[in-house]
Image (cartoon, rainbow, N blue to C red):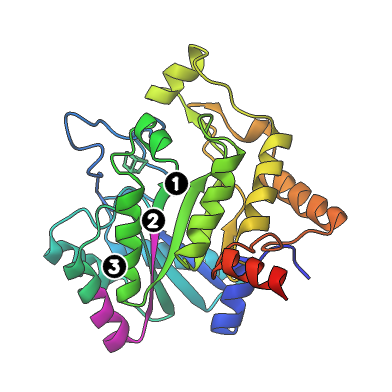
Amino acid sequence: MSVFRKYSTYLQEKYGEKVYKLSINLPLTCPNRNQDNLGGCTFCADVGTGFSSAPSIDVKKQLEERKDIIKKRYNADKYIAYFQNYTNTYMPLETFKKYILSAVVPDVVEIDISTRPDCITDEQLAFLAEVKKERNIDVTLELGLQTVNYKTLDRIRRGHGLAEFIDGIMRIKKYGFEVCVHLILNLPWDDDRDVIENAKVLSALKVEQVKLHALYVMDHTVMGDQYKNGEFEICSAEEYQEKVITFLRHLDPEIVVQRLLGRAPRENSLFVNWNQSWWKIRDSIEDTMEKRRVVQGDLCNYLGGKAYEQEMKKQK
Ligand code: SF4
């Protein structure tokens, strides 16, 4: 049995076979980069936050190209169209509709849209609900949060706080879509109490999925300059592992974990995953949890009126 609820297993259960993500890269920016007084999150490099194909080619073509590669490699039959880079809801409604409909193609069973908690509207959600119903396709929203510590959010210039995140989650839930939340578990300004609160807030809000990242630092960013000036330090790989374990133990066991740390681009980077393979760190976390006999959710005992229950137990 796995020590945490794995995304691959969840997809296999949901769709009856392996499902692969096809990244789509749109010619976009994000509201946090596009305003003179903001300038973007301090860790964000020009390329956005991921790796995918050039933004000039159309969505259908991008999907076909990625599909050909994945089909040859894994003999896959079902796919998730993943709008990955920047803020994929930051555009006029009609443009958004056009892009989303272009991704409704044979063999794509789900559309996955990455965005910011403060950049999703009821009009967009109502349109997605229509697409889901009429085209019989699942929709997931991926929200970048990074941390529930709103003071750290200010410090890394996210341009939103915790309240905007809660608002985004509540409105998405009204339309019944699944949500995946992205967190950076080792932001240098957060401590272990923040790690626990991250797990608690996601569990209390009943989000469906989470994706964890270890902080990586890119050159030519505000954070890159701070790092070079010695303004902060990054915790060790061992400390990161402990943070992940603490997080998982406090996380509702129903929440699906997409990953424990990300692959990060090496080009132009100043710090990436302690110069180790991401999968080695992932395996080490799993091995450690197995050895300690701890699992996701074994400390998730704080919801549902805990204080009342404890008092009642005492009185028995
Ligand atoms: S929200 Fe995303 S794309 Fe926008 S500045 Fe932050 S990391 Fe970059």
Where residue 215 sits in the image (x, y, percent)?
54, 36
Q: From where the camera sits, is residue 18 visible?
A: no
Q: Position of residue 186 (x, y in %)?
A: 57, 37
Mark earlier in primary sequence (3, 1):
1
Left or right: where does residue 74 sit relative to residue 219?
A: right
Residue drawn at point x = 36 percent, y = 48 percent: 162
Which of labels 3 and 2 is toward the front?
3
Element at badge 3?
A: helix
Residue at image point 36% right, 77% down: 176
Q: Quadrant of the N terminus?
A: bottom right
Label 2 CB sits under 8 Å from any ligand 1 atom: no
Residue 135 magenta-highlighted: yes
Q: Earlier in the sequence, mark 3 or mark 2?
A: 2
Task: State ligand 1's quadrant.
Answer: top left
Q: Quadrant of residue 38?
A: top left
* Residue type for callout 1: Val
Q: Is residue 312 magenta?
A: no
Neighbor class of circle 1 (other Cα within 10 Å; few <14, some 14-19, many 20+) is many
Horizontal relation, residue 125 to residue 24: left or right: left
Q: State which mark lies toward you, 1 or 2.
A: 1
For the view shown, which residue lies furthest in the top direction?
229
Secondary element under disc 1, as helix, strand or loop, is: loop
* Residue placed under numbered mark 1 in the picture: 148
Q: CA distance from mark 1 to mark 2?
A: 13 Å
Can residue 314 be seen in this snapshot?
yes
Instruction: Report which residue position mark 2 lands on.
Output: 143
Q: Are marks 3 and 2 in contact (CB under 8 Å)?
A: no
Q: Residues within 10 Å of mark 2 (few under 14, many from 20)?
A: many
For disc 3, the neighbor class at 10 Å (few under 14, some 14 to 19, many from 20) is: some
Task: List the single residue furthest toward the right.
Answer: 291
Please, is residue 18 above or below residue 236 in the view?
below
